[in-house]
Image (cartoon, rainbow, N blue to C red):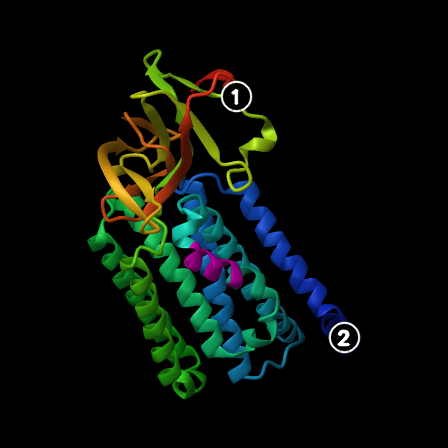
Amino acid sequence: MKERFHKFREFLEKYEGRISFLFLIGGFIFDNLTLQRVDQVLDIIIVVIYLGIAGGSIIFLNYFKEYEPHKNFFIWMREFFPFAIQFTLGGLFSVFLVFYSRSAAISSSWPFLVFLLLLLVGNEFFRNYYHRLTFQIAIYYVAILSFSILILPVLLKHMNAGIFLLSGLLSLVTMTLFTRILLRVVSRRYKSSRVDINRIVAGIFIVVNILYFTNLIPPIPLAMKDSGVYYSVTKSGENSYELIGEERGWYESIPFLYPTVMHLGAGEPVYVFSAVFAPTGLSTNVVHDWQHFDEETGKWVSVTKITFNIVGGRNDGYRVFSKKESLVNGKWRVDVKTERGQIIGRIGFSVEPSSSAVVFEKKVL
């Protein structure tokens, strides 16, 4: 039996990097295959299971570090728990990256998304730190806070600054209960790190609040499902819209390489269409903020703001459109955002004089 254990341990030490990488990729693939909507009960249950396994693995790993196991089975389990922590936390951050990125305009929310991406990708390089209680708690608290921010608007069917603060309070209560368990189970290890743990949790809480109130956190659980700029948008039936825009090749759909150009005659209107997903039962307001780039000052100037009330539940998003006439030539954009100013999506385009070479195409959504 001892010989088997030594071989098992040698195998882990020799292939630890590859095994942990496979665990990370496995968690990411599993999430992308199974998680569809932020308000799906099964998706929520999977995330809760991940959090439970990660929390349980942290407790048992530290228990076996404080109380040396003697039976081979528990010795094997002690070697396994760091992988379990890495797998579940890697899976959690892949979930959060998917959900939060769906709710984000990269131009405004990139700091938070980069943070989540670093936690996901860096998970492979952090494996040596998963034996440290302070590091385990820090990463675990980020996961709990991210989940609290995501789930409370879904459960309460409302979203505002008060709900966000309540999410933070929920995460602190959850972490307090978790550390109470650690205090009972591994009192010596926890007491030696308690001051650092409290500082880390407080620091993460403060930083995330700063990101939220500076509108750098995406407006989760809202998500842009479709958007575009058109020459005409009309409702063609009870549940469909007819959109007329310029014909563009597939390669021209990359906005950074081929920005949309609207060729307009005098006084002709431009329509901006957006479809914003919200969880079932959630009702909130979104804003179309029309902005023009002032070449003299080098700044974007808000020209018109149009507010819509949307109701959640439709898988392809709640559809609205706004119209503006007599646009001057130059660069324009429409920010689709919450009333607080969190940007859900951004539609950029430029206006040029009418051209006879324009080829129109129609699509129905």
- At 69% from the left edge and 63% from the top edge, which residue is drawn? 19
Q: Nearer the viewer, residue 218 or 96?
A: 218
Q: Quadrant of residue 194?
A: bottom left
Say whether disc 1 or disc 2 marks the residue closer to the N-terminus: 2
Circle number at residue 10: 2
Residue 194, relative to residue 357: is it above or below?
A: below
- Under mark 1, the amino acid is Glu
Circle number at residue 24: none
Res 284 visible:
no
The spot of residue 333 in percent (x, y) is 36, 39
Task: Bin the neighbour count of mark 1 within 10 Å (Cα to Cα): few under 14, some 14-19, many 20 and up.
Answer: few
**Horizontally, is 341 left or right of 52 in the view?**
left
- At 29% from the left edge and 21% from the top edge, which residue is drawn? 267
Q: How far apart are marks 1 and 2 (CA)?
A: 61 Å
Q: Give the range drawn in magenta.
A: 110-118
**Horizontally, is 68 left or right of 18 in the view?**
left
Q: Which of 139 and 109 is in front in this view?
A: 109
**Horizontally, is 51 left or right of 307 in the view?**
right
State the residue position of label 1.
247
Callout 1: SS: loop
